[in-house]
Amino acid sequence: MKESKYIYNPFFLENKKFIQWRLTRTSQLEDFWSSFIHENPDLEEEFKISIEIFDKIAINKRIFNDTDILYKQIIESVLYKKKRKKRIIYYISSAAAIALLFLISTLYFIRKDNNSMMAISAEVIGKTLPEQEVKLLAGGKEIVLNQNVTVHLNDGQISYTDSADIEKTLEVNNVQTNKLIVPNGKRSFLILADGTKVWINSGTELEFPTNFSGKTRDIKLAGEIYLDVAQLSKQPFIVHTPDLDVQVFGTRFNVSAYTLDKTSSVVLVNGKVQVKTKDNKSIMMNPNEMVEFRDGSIYAEKVDVSFYTSWVNGVFMFDSTPVSELFKKVGRYYNVSFENIESDKKITGKLYLSENLRDVVSSISLLTGQEYIIENDVIKVIR
């Protein structure tokens, strides 16, 4: 991709007052910067370029892959090259993320400065819930596991790391069924006896056998998983959910079937999948399709699969998504209870799933255009 050169003056794009101005556009800040440029005409060109770069951030527009690359480069502090008189920044054609790092790191100062200008009212919309543990039910035992633990089945044994961070092996009966319970706020990874890899999202229960000894390989799901299924043509792989049976013929796909959700869905990345309802309606899926079951009917449509599988890589992606859907996903992922989310607003963009909930809430503020804060494990929105 062709690169471009821009004169980049860090005084503006790293300046909190400049960032606050571009975000809030208050009359006080408009007057300040108008006077500043009037008194410093030699900086006018760099000032205009900084405005152009900043305004391309497009908080409520999709951030493309080249922007993600740039964002990572910013974090690693490798973009800037010192010159004798000026700094030059080389950036990939979409300059949308140049100030994003500074936005995230300075979001809260805006509220602090604005407190002197107006009264702030905050409404509680969410609170963190008591932490629960990942549990493995196998061999007649209930085993507490670490967050993001890998559970591996092989030759009648289950290998895992327990809550004390000790690697252990459990002998299990070849014909028994095991269950992995991953509560809200936790994730896990499972390698089944046939080599199939399963990424398990928050709020999920998965039942699976120690070995696949029958004509089919069957697992039961309530929640959400992403699978990379080992190809065994003579032994089809089937995922059973409360609403759907998903028969697989060697593929990668995502299944979402949360008990409390009104819909279930299957998103196919590649390979071949047949989806059946309990009353024997069926659809054969093609790659880059989503099949959704809602209100007793089944539907298929073309989709960008990355919007449904990106959680595996620590990202939520949104495209004209209701704000309520964002909070539902975030609440499940971080074990937070949200309420009073009654906005008709839709958002588009990416949310990086940091281990730090405060960072995530700060990023949500950028996506939604509202300010959220955390105080004593309670999440508030600034009205």
Image (tube, grey):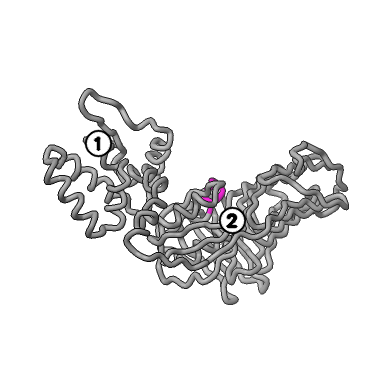
Q: Is residue 204 above or below residue 340?
A: above
Residue tagged by mark 2?
333
Instruction: Give the class, few, some or many, for how many residues have Cα within 10 Å of label 1's Cα (few <14, many ≥20).
Output: some
Residue denoted by label 1: 8
Name the residue at 41% across, 52% down: 108
Magenta span: chief secondary structure:
helix
Q: Nearer the viewer, mark 2 or mark 1?
A: 1
- Contact between labelled residues 1 and 2, with CB atoms less than 8 Å apart: no
CA gap, disc 2 to disc 1?
38 Å
Quarter the N terminus occupies:
top left
SS for callout 2 = helix
- Residue at the image position 53 percent from the left and 47 percent from the top: 354
Residue 26 falls left or right of residue 330 = left
Q: Is residue 168 magenta?
A: no
The earlier-in-sequence mark between 2 and 1 is 1
Magenta-tinted stretch:
309-314
Q: Is residue 35 left or right of residue 206?
A: left
The extreme bottom residue here reads 295
